[in-house]
Every structure is written in C-alpha cells, then in structure tokens.
Image (cartoon, rainbow, N blue to C red):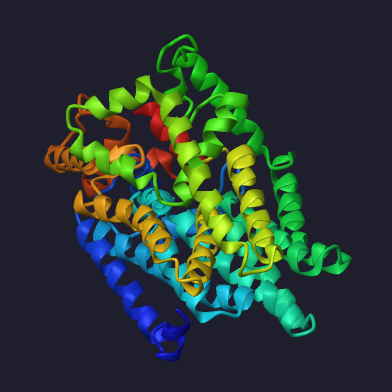
C-alpha cells in the first residue's frame, strides 16, 4: 500500500470514482425499493396536513417524548417519487464516506488507511441497509454525515489552537444533528473518546466535546420535563410489547428472539446485542440477509434458530482465533498504543449502541471505527507481506456485500422488497375508488396514501382536521378512521 501511495492510487479522485460506482450500483440494484410501513403516514400524512391547512410547509413539529423538529421539517419535503428520495439519501451516504476519508487522514496521517476506511465503510451494508432502504430512516444517514463532519471539525479545533470559528461550528453542527434524531448523540461521545486517546484528561477538551450534548439535554428537559425521556420510554414500551407478544423464555428458539427490536433488556439481551453489533461492524450480518433470499424454504433459518448457542460459540471462537493470529503478526511492526486507542474507541462505541441505544441496525459510528481498525490491520499486514491473512480478511469483509448485491438487496431489516411492492401495488389499485377500502392489508398506512391522492374529492371531510398540530392530526386521524 506504500506503493499505492507512490503511484497516486489512493488519491481523492480515484476514491470519488470508486465510491461513486459503488453507490450508483447500489441505487440501480435497489431502484424498486418502495415506501414501507411508517413511510406512508409520515410522508403522506405530513403532505395531507399541509393541504388541509392550505400551507406549503410548517416550521415546527415534534413528539411528546422526543425533540426532533428538524426531522419533521425535512420529512414534509420528501418527494412522492421514491427513487428521487432514495437517490438523495444514498448521495448523503456517499458524502459521509468522503468525510470519513478526510477524518481518517487527521487521525492516522496515512492516505492508504484513509482510502480503505472510506471504501470499507461504504461497503458495510450490514449496518447501512435499513436506513438506506427505508425512507423515514433517512435521519440516521443524515446523522452520520453531520456526525462525521462534526468530528472532523472537532479535530481541527486542536489543530488550529482552539480557534473560535471551529468551536462554534462544532456546536452548531452537533445541535442541528441532534434535532434530526437522537442517534446523533453518539458523535460527541466518539469525539470525547478520541480526545481522551490523544490528549488524555485535559479539562477544556472534555468540556468542548460534551457541551453540545448537555445543551440538547437541557432543551429536551425544558420541552418534556424529563432528561432524554425517549431512552426511558423505549424501555417501558419494549417491556409492554414483550408482554403483549407473550415472549416465551422456555421456548427452544427464545434465544433467537432476543435479537428482535423489542428484546428484553437483561444480561442475555445485552449479550446478544453486543454479539450482533460486533458481527455487523465487520459486515458479516449481510450474509443473513442473503440467506433470506437463497433459503426460500427457511431450512437454514430453522437450523440456526434451533442451534443458535452453538452458532454463536463457533462464530466467537473463530473470531478469537483470527484476532489472535492477526495480533501475533502485528506485534512486531507497530506500537501497541496505536491499536489500543482504536480498540478503546471501538469498545466505547460498541457499548453505547448495545447497552444505551440497544440497537443493532443503524450503528454508523461503529461502522466507521471498525472500518478504520480493519484498514489499519490490512495496511500493517501488507508491510509485513502477509498476503494470505490479508486475503482472508478481505474475503470475510467483502464477500457478504457481494452475496447481498447478488440477491439485489431484496431484504432490508424487517422488510422484503416483494412485500413492499405488493402492498404498494395494492394501494395504487385501491386509490382509484371513491371510498377508502377498510379491508385492505395495513389499512392504517393505506389511508394516508389514499387521502393524499384523493384529496380534492375529500376536502370537505378533511376540513375537520384543520388547525390542529401535526401530532394532534395524527392522533385524531387514526382515531376517527
């Protein structure tokens, strides 16, 4: 890779070309992705709300237990052509990858590592697929772009002797990012962990990194009367849904269900979250989505469900063996401190996503740190000329993406393209009628699509929802329909 540097193969124009081709290919393979689930009420509901109130847009709306006005402001402008919006979200993903290139240069002073980190981040569809394919999850892609930009600016603060312009820019971008979704809260914490690795316990750096987070917590408290109530409410909602779904701890497949969105927050639940996040951070979770396309009779899925503990053990043991041999090879070439810093940041990020956010599908910050760690490992192995282990690591990381692409990315998160297309076609066929079809599947989603497309024919009926807040409109519309 040093030779790559000399031959200018890792320069920015080449990176832009590679990232552009990867993202254009992704858009092409997912061009049939259509609105799913919350897309209908969120996107079409906001448009109905503006039509009812005879306005082009609104400035402010949020939720009772969340303060994300910028998210709702953006949502109302999502175009009804899903391909346009899908392409725009992927474009922000592309921009995030470019920011990561510059960010990694600041951290490593190495073009080759930065080049690889940006590409590996882009290829990690284990983490990005849900946000890239589900329209109303755009906030997490936007969070990543602004989050990585804020980290880059944070590093510039100390590169330029704490210039006020960089401090102010860091605060503004961080606060705007929080107003999109709470997932942005991870980025000041990544800044803090990076600062602790580089500058140790200097007080002013710690303060600068967490001030935007503290300001946001105070804003949320003034709005809701609680400190980050979403985190507490989410735990209570999860418990209620688990009870309603009769979560069965004695089931032979109960361990598999701990991977669900509403898994119990106990030792076993946290352990599985950590396991899932580690596998996703090295892109191995994409294999699961590929199997969903290949395993049409769900035979492999049943085998994994029924033998999940053995599967986890084999995976963990294999990973430990690989880590052991890689560490043995790298021991002679680099200062342990350099790896300890990256591993420290990785572990902090992993634990925040797994224990605090309790998520395993939108962890863009973890994707960046893992890509950085893998890129540095490959760079050092290349210097040692260990081609076999380099080939193995590349194979393990890139093959899941290739398999996933071969299935046309048909499965993303909790949804499949086939299901979303069939619902959309059913919705399109039913909007031609003068009355909404209450027998249709997912009627609560369909009615937003119906009334938006038949607004002129239902103006008089919809007038009763005028002069409500957006949240009141959603509540009343759902109640009366």
Q: Is 404 left or right of 206, judged from the image as shown? A: left
Please tell me which residue lies in front, 466 or 39.
39
Please tell me which residue lies in front, 45 or 345.
345
Residue 474 pos. (x, y %): 44, 38
Residue 126 pos. (x, y %): 39, 49
Residue drawn at (20%, 53%), measured in percent from left and top?
A: 406
Quarter of the image containing the N terminus? bottom left
Residue 239 pos. (x, y %): 57, 21
Which quadrant holds residue 430? Answer: top left
Which quadrant holds residue 352? Answer: top right
Residue drawn at (45%, 18%), measured in percent from left and top?
A: 254
Residue 133 pos. (x, y %): 33, 51
- Taking the image as drawn, is residue 266 in sight? no
Question: Is 170 rendered above or below residue 309?
Answer: below
Question: Is 378 rendered above or below residue 158?
Answer: above
Residue at far top of view: 250
């Amino acid at each position: 890779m040093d030779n790559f540097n000399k031959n200018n193969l890792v320069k920015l124009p080449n990176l832009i070309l590679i990232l552009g081709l990867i993202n254009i290919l992704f858009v092409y393979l997912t061009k049939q992705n259509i609105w799913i689930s919350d897309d209908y009420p969120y996107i079409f509901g906001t448009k109905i709300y503006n039509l009812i109130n005879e306005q082009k847009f609104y400035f402010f709306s949020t939720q009772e237990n969340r303060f994300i006005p910028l998210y709702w402001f953006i949502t109302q402008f999502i175009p009804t052509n899903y391909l346009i919006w899908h392409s725009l979200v992927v474009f922000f993903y592309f921009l995030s990858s470019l920011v990561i290139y510059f960010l990694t240069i600041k951290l490593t002073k190495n073009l080759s590592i930065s080049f690889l980190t940006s590409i590996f981040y882009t290829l990690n569809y284990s983490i990005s697929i849900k946000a890239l394919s589900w329209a109303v999850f755009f906030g997490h892609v936007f969070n990543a772009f602004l989050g990585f930009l804020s980290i880059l600016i944070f590093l510039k603060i100390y590169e330029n002797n704490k210039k006020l312009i960089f401090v102010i820019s860091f605060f503004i971008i961080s606060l705007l990012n929080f107003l999109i979704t709470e997932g942005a809260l991870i980025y000041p914490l990544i800044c803090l962990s990076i600062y602790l690795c580089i500058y140790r316990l200097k007080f002013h750096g710690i303060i600068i990194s967490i001030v935007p987070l503290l300001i946001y917590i105070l804003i949320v408290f003034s709005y809701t009367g609680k400190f980050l109530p979403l985190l507490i409410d989410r735990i209570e909602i999860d418990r209620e849904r688990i009870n309603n779904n009769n979560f069965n701890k004695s089931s032979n497949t109960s361990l598999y269900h701990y991977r669900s969105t509403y898994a119990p927050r106990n030792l076993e639940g946290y352990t599985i979250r950590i396991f899932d996040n580690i596998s996703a951070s090295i892109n191995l979770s994409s294999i699961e989505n590929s199997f969903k396309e290949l395993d049409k009779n769900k035979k492999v899925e049943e085998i994994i469900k029924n033998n999940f503990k053995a599967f986890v053990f084999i995976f963990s043991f294999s990973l430990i063996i690989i880590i052991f041999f890689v560490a043995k090879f790298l021991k002679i070439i680099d200062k342990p401190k350099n790896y300890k810093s990256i591993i420290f940041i990785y572990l902090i990020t992993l634990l925040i996503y797994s224990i605090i956010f309790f998520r395993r599908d939108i962890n863009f910050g973890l994707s960046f740190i893992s890509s950085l760690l893998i890129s540095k490992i490959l760079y050092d192995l290349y210097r040692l000329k260990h081609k076999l282990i380099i080939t193995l690591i590349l194979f393990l990381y890139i093959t899941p993406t290739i398999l996933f692409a071969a299935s046309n990315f048909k499965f993303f998160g909790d949804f499949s393209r086939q299901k979303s297309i069939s619902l959309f076609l059913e919705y399109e066929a039913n909007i031609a009628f003068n009355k909404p079809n209450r027998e249709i599947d997912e009627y609560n989603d369909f009615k937003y699509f119906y009334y938006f497309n038949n607004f002129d024919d239902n103006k008089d009926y919809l007038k009763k929802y005028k002069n409500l807040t957006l949240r009141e409109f959603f509540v009343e519309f759902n109640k009366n329909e």
